[in-house]
Image: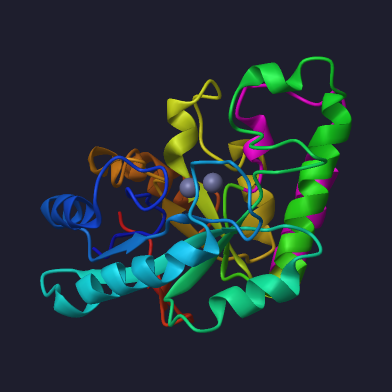
Amino acid sequence: MYKTDYHTHTFHSDGRSNAEEYIETAIKRGFSEIGISDHILICKTDETWCMAPSDLDNYYENISLLRESTKQISVKVGLEVDYIEGKERDIVKMLEKYDLDYRIGSVHFIKGMISIDSSPEIYVGKDFDFLFRSYFDAVTKAVKSGLFDIIGHFDLIRIFCQQPSFDPSPLYRDFSKCLKKNDVVFELNTNGRNKPLKDFYPDRRFLGILADDKNKVCVNSDAHFAGLVGQHFEEAYRLLRSVGFTEMATFTKRKREMVPIPR
Ligand SMILES: [Zn+2]
Ligand SMILES: [Zn+2]
């Protein structure tokens, strides 16, 4: 049984455990690989949940040392990179000197709204239908940018349980086609369980669409402390198998290999 968890946050960004604690927990829970993927944001803001480009050398050095020195489990060095439209070239330049195992591309900002996952209050008085479409527009651009191996929580906008007034299935269908065409992996992110949504990203009703298009998936916890490594993964594996997925993606130095989804 080959288990991986590629989406975790340490003290380098907004996590509350260090990388060693993630590694230790992953070993105890029978994982074959554990990846660290702290937040990096190219723009300078007052946000404290992410690293700035000037923090990257230190982050890369620390995590890649663990990648080399850890024997009991395969440690992967990743990043969760905020996709900012118009900053693609800067993102390429920022990342090119690091030998990462994978890049997760995520959208936390749309239409001037900072951290759409920060609180439900920021949605008050806003047109949710417009924001929902805008979010899909942004993640679609992130996929097309060619910058990323994995697209993170691609319907994060569901976090506070709000629903658009229209049927969103065409958006999921188009996004699924876009993933396939651009050969980008999506993650089943189990951290929505800890949010008002109380479920996974993406919306389980549309996972069958992603499977039918033969998309590639990996299962990630988005843990912000080590105790959440592998949270709800058995359920996630069952769910993926139930809609037709049989394999999941692993990455080494940005080269992808597929492994069976654990039973
Ligand atoms: Zn995220
Ligand atoms: Zn994250």
Q: How is the image coloured?
A: rainbow
Residue nearer the viewer, 159 or 173: 159
Residue 142 inside the magenta-drawn segment: no
Tell me residue 231's x, y (percent). Answer: 32, 40
Residue nearer the viewer, 166 or 7: 7
Q: Is residue 198 visible?
A: yes
**Residue drawn at the location 63% of the way across and 66% of the way down:** 214
Q: State the extent of the magenta-drawn residues as a range.
A: 154-179
Quarter of the image holding residue 119?
top right
Q: Is residue 145 left or right of residue 127?
A: left
Residue 158 inside the magenta-drawn segment: yes
Tell me residue 212's x, y (percent). Answer: 67, 59
Q: Is 39 rendered above or below residue 72?
A: above
Q: Is 54 rendered above or below residue 18?
A: below
Tell me residue 90's x, y (percent). Answer: 69, 72
Quadrant (top left, top right, bottom left, bottom right) of the N terminus: bottom left
